């Protein structure tokens, strides 16, 4: 598990006075950088090797502007060519949202999924 | 089922050349207006009565800037105080993404879920 | 002048109950499609020929979720290799925001600005 | 002048491979937190006292995903009831974008601008 700190931005609130639900998708993607680096060390989009097959986000408590947020991220499943990343957003000692993203190792040229190498699996396990 | 047309905006693309996955969350929320109006006819946020408990989005094909998108929306489950909204994003005759949002009828003052009335259930069924 | 209709999305509001100011930048860019098409008819990003040098947005009245918005767009200055696009956001018969974007005809390969052709100038004038 | 560090998120890129121009508006607003705290110490939106009259952003060089960004912020003009905040986005030792926001001390109840107090002016000067 690794931790990613962030400060909510004012534009991420909505008219209900809290952080809008769609923002969690951007926070969680932002916090997946370390996962992306297993496949593209320098994060160059021209050398990207992952596609997102699916993600889900569950809301447990409201998140607010004005207090720091911690995103916790870990790899929760490693399959043949895909894996799951589980993430949580914590604020003021509370787990406010959690989510799972299913990522696929992918070759954009041939438009096909590619098996994960042993080294990649090991690196994912360390996250 | 109802249809909601939209034109992708340039800022909704990402460095992989397609629409970023997090954008689907905003398109789907945008297209839930008719669902929101069952509970808040004039869409005034001060009179809001729904919270989002969970949503998931699955990706079937890439979406691109430059071609119109149609969001299809329908209510796929009606429970005691919650219900599911299923949505699809179509472009160029292809279903590119689909998702489910679980919404809860909610009283923001007492911070509790509220049973759906018969009239609300009927209106949701018509969507 | 051309008109571009849009419906504000719930996630575009902020905790002050109105449309967040940063959203105007995305609406205005979205409404510049017809300008982009003068340079890239099919809107393919791989064939893009414009960069944004500068933009400014002025706020005259609040914009709200729940009512349709009209973006009005026209070319307000045509120079040698750059031009200005002026835009306004109208809601409920009121001009709520206005802005100017300075766009430069650009060659991404040589990383240099390129003079506007007579044909491009004519097409811009028609907008 | 104060500094605000951030890491670009993948969804903030666009199909041209760089950070989309509209994202700068959200980064700059995010980095204005310390300015907002002069007027609303706990950043509670229900006690907000500023409106944005205008902002402009100028682009000097492309910003990319993968490298840290520093936002530099200072108050560049203090008037009777309004003031200017100037901001710059730096990446890899280069000033990539700069902007000015004009903020007005405002009473949302009476919908009128309010003169800046001496104490507020002093605190703004220290930024």
Image: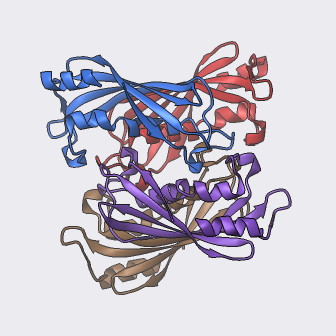
Chain colours: A brown, B purple, C blue, D red
Q: Looking at the image, which residue is at 42% across and 80% down? A: A83
Does A112 sit left or right of B119 as displayed?
left
x and y, in percent, of residue A41 in the image: 32, 64
Q: Quadrant of residue D35?
A: top right
**Rendered location of residue C123, percent (x, y):** 21, 26
Q: Residue at x 71, y 36 (%)?
A: D37
Against A72, is D15 above or below?
A: above
Rendered view: D12 above or below C1 = below
Where in the figure is residue A54, as x and y percent of width and height?
Answer: 44, 72
| Camera-side residue of C57 and C40 | C40
Q: Is residue B97 above or below residue B67?
A: below
User: Can the viewer see residue D11?
Assistant: yes
Vertical arrangement, residue B95 with respect to residue C31, above or below: below
Q: Quadrant of the C terminus of chain B?
A: bottom right
Query: Residue lying furthest top in this view?
Result: D80
Q: Depth check: give the residue in front, C101 or D2.
A: C101
* Image position of B75 (left or right of B91): right
Residues B125 and C24: in front is B125
Residue C20, quarter of the rendered image = top right
Q: Is residue A87 visible?
A: no
Residue that extends furthest to the right in the rendered view of this protein: B110
Numbered label tally:
0
* Side of D69 relative to D94 (left or right): right
| Residue B118 percent coordinates (x, y) | 76, 70
């Amino acid at each position: 598990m690794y931790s990613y700190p962030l400060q909510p931005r004012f534009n991420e609130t909505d008219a209900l006075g809290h952080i809008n639900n769609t923002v969690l998708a951007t926070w969680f993607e932002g916090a997946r950088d370390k996962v992306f680096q297993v496949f593209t060390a320098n994060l160059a989009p021209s050398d990207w090797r992952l596609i997102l097959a699916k993600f889900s986000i569950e809301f447990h408590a409201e998140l607010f502007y004005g207090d720091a947020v911690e995103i916790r991220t870990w790899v929760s499943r490693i399959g043949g060519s895909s894996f799951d990343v589980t993430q949580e957003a914590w604020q003021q000692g509370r787990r406010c949202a959690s989510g799972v993203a299913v990522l696929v190792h992918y070759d954009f040229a041939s438009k096909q999924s590619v098996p994960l190498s042993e080294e990649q699996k090991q690196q994912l396990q360390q996250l």
